[in-house]
Image: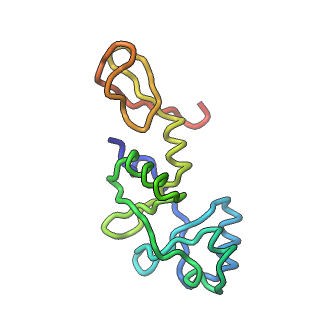
Amino acid sequence: MIPVKQVMNRNVLTFRESTPVGEAARVLSENHITGAPVVAGEGEVVGIVSEIDILTKRGTKVGDIMSPHVISVNEDTGIVEAARLLAGERIRRLPVLRRGRLVGLLSRSDVLDFFTRSHWSCRRCGHTERGLEAPEECRHCGGKRFELERTLPGT
């Protein structure tokens, strides 16, 4: 199992409930992202604000328009489980928590990037296969031991 802490983005843009909506819109636009966690106090996630919230809801502060229902995972959650949650809940991002505090963010594009830059190699014959988790058995030799190999960006 590959935990999300190996794939998540640790440099997370966040907002406070008191952030003006116009500032949040500008920051999201300048950073080419579609949403970000809203945090309080010591990094507790209290909401998510997205471009849809900004475009469709009325309010002057992020706290007025954010979605307070936050679906999150912990850093040891497996990437397969997180990917199923992203798809099943039809959401774009999952805050990653450690002891209730934000430590990262996993987006659908992070999962897609992991998929495109990773493959599983059969330790017996060297055959490779893409996937979020190791295959149960090699389609070429029947081997059951795989090693995760990741390519670097630009290779």
Q: Position of residue 96 (x, y in %)?
A: 41, 61
Q: Residue furthest front?
A: 88
What kind of colouring is applied to the model shown? rainbow
Q: Is residue 25 above or below residue 118?
A: below
Q: Is residue 132 above or below residue 39?
A: above
Question: Which residue lies at the image location 37% right of the left edge and 49% below the top edge?
Answer: 81
Question: Which residue lies at the image location 67% right of the left edge and 59% below the top edge?
Answer: 32
Q: Is residue 17 above or below residue 102?
A: below
Q: Is residue 74 above or below residue 142?
A: below
Of 12 and 144, which appears nearest the observer? 144
Question: Which residue lies at the image location 46% right of the left edge and 52% below the top edge?
Answer: 8
Q: Position of residue 136 (x, y in %)?
A: 32, 28
Q: Quadrant of residue 140?
A: top left
Quadrant location of the N terminus in the rendered image: top left
Of 141 and 8, which appears nearest the observer? 141
Question: Which residue lies at the image location 52% right of the left edge and 63% below the top edge?
Answer: 12
Q: Position of residue 14 (x, y in %)?
A: 54, 70
Total count of labels:
0
Q: Quadrant of residue 103?
A: bottom left
Quadrant location of the C terminus in the rendered image: top right
16 to the left or right of 40? right
101 to the left or right of 20? left
Q: Position of residue 50 (x, y in %)?
A: 60, 68
